[in-house]
Image (cartoon, helix red, strand yellow):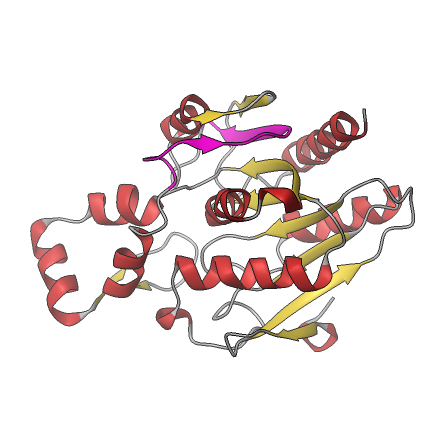
């Protein structure tokens, strides 16, 4: 799908969110899937497109989206924050998804998915995270800055940080301060549905310790962590894609069973 083929949802917050939805053709009691992408990513990524195709084969509804300031959606990336992007996801789910959904959160999308599970647990049937990055604005960005960088951020409102994937990106004071209002690893995190965390051991962006901390912190009746030796943050080679698909099949079966 190209950006020209995207559909759009105008939210109550005044943002225009690009999305692509494919309806399910299987049993009505099978929950749909919502894919939530990462920081500065979009819904055209390898994982989102692969999983949508796999869902179509199974007759399972699938929904992917661009947060505001990302991809084909409206807004300026540097003006956004975790609260905005979580609100975008909530608006899309409320308007376009039918019944409880299986959330698939990649990197920052894992944090967004955990926020959704906390805000509207009745709409979550299951959860799969891929290299989840909960609380990364505090525990990675802010914690990784030196005193000079922190002072510059607080004084000027933004700093530029290098990226392994593209041009340097902007970290704003607004992003850091808003992130502190959305932390999920400091308070109880109840996940009362099937949950699968996937994490690569060679991930240079989200350390394996984050996945272990998340597993230790979350509580629920059916939570598992799978570590993939040698997998990096992209988690999108053939074996990783097949693992994500198999994990979604497992979660779907656990819900149906």
Between residue 141 and residue 230, name the one nearer to us: 141
The residue that appears at 55% across and 30% down in the rendered structure is 197
The residue that appears at 14% across and 63% down in the rendered structure is 154
| 60 relative position to 192: left or right | right
The residue that appears at 53% across and 48% down in the rendered structure is 116
Q: Which residues are magenta?
A: 184-201
Expressed as whole percent of the image width and height from the top left, the position of residue 111 reads: 46, 45
Expressed as whole percent of the image width and height from the top left, the position of residue 164 reads: 38, 52
Tally the marks: 0
The image quarter containing residue 77 is bottom left
The image quarter containing residue 248 is top right
Quadrant (top left, top right, bottom left, bottom right) of the N terminus: bottom right
Between residue 172 and residue 220, name the one nearer to us: 220
Q: Is residue 198 magenta?
A: yes
Q: Is residue 100 magenta?
A: no
Classify 170 as above or below 110.
Answer: below
Classify 229 as above or below 48.
Answer: above
Between residue 250 and residue 230, name the one nearer to us: 250
The image quarter containing residue 55 is top right
Classify 139 as above or below 8.
Answer: above
Expressed as whole percent of the image width and height from the top left, the position of residue 238 reads: 68, 37
Between residue 51 and residue 16, name the one nearer to us: 16
| 31 relative position to 142: left or right | right
Expressed as whole percent of the image width and height from the top left, the position of residue 231 reads: 52, 31
Quadrant (top left, top right, bottom left, bottom right) of the C terminus: top right
The residue that appears at 74% across and 25% down in the rendered structure is 254
């Amino acid at each position: 799908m190209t950006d020209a083929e995207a559909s759009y949802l105008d939210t109550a917050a005044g943002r225009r969110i690009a999305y692509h939805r494919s309806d399910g053709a299987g049993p009505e009691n099978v929950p749909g899937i919502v894919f939530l992408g990462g920081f500065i990513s979009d819904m055209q990524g390898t994982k989102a497109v692969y999983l949508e195709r796999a869902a179509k084969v199974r007759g399972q509804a699938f929904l992917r989206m661009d947060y505001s300031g990302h991809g084909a959606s409206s807004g300026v990336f540097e003006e956004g924050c975790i609260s905005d992007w979580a609100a975008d996801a909530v608006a899309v789910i409320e308007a376009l998804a039918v019944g409880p959904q299986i959330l698939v959160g990649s990197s920052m999308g894992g944090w967004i998915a955990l926020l959704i599970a906390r805000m509207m647990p009745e709409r979550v049937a299951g959860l799969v995270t891929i290299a989840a990055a909960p609380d990364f604005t505090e525990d990675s960005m802010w914690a990784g800055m030196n005193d000079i960088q922190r002072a510059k951020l607080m004084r000027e409102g933004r700093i530029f940080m290098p990226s392994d994937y593209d041009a340097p990106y902007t970290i704003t004071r607004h992003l850091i301060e808003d992130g502190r209002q959305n932390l999920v690893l400091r308070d109880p995190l109840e996940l009362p549905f099937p949950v699968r965390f996937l994490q690569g051991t060679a991930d240079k962006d989200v350390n394996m310790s984050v996945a272990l901390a998340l597993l230790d912190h979350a509580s629920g009746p059916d939570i598992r962590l799978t570590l993939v030796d040698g997998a990096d943050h992209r988690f999108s080679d053939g074996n990783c894609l097949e693992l994500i698909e198999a994990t979604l099949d497992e979660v779907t079966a656990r819900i149906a069973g």
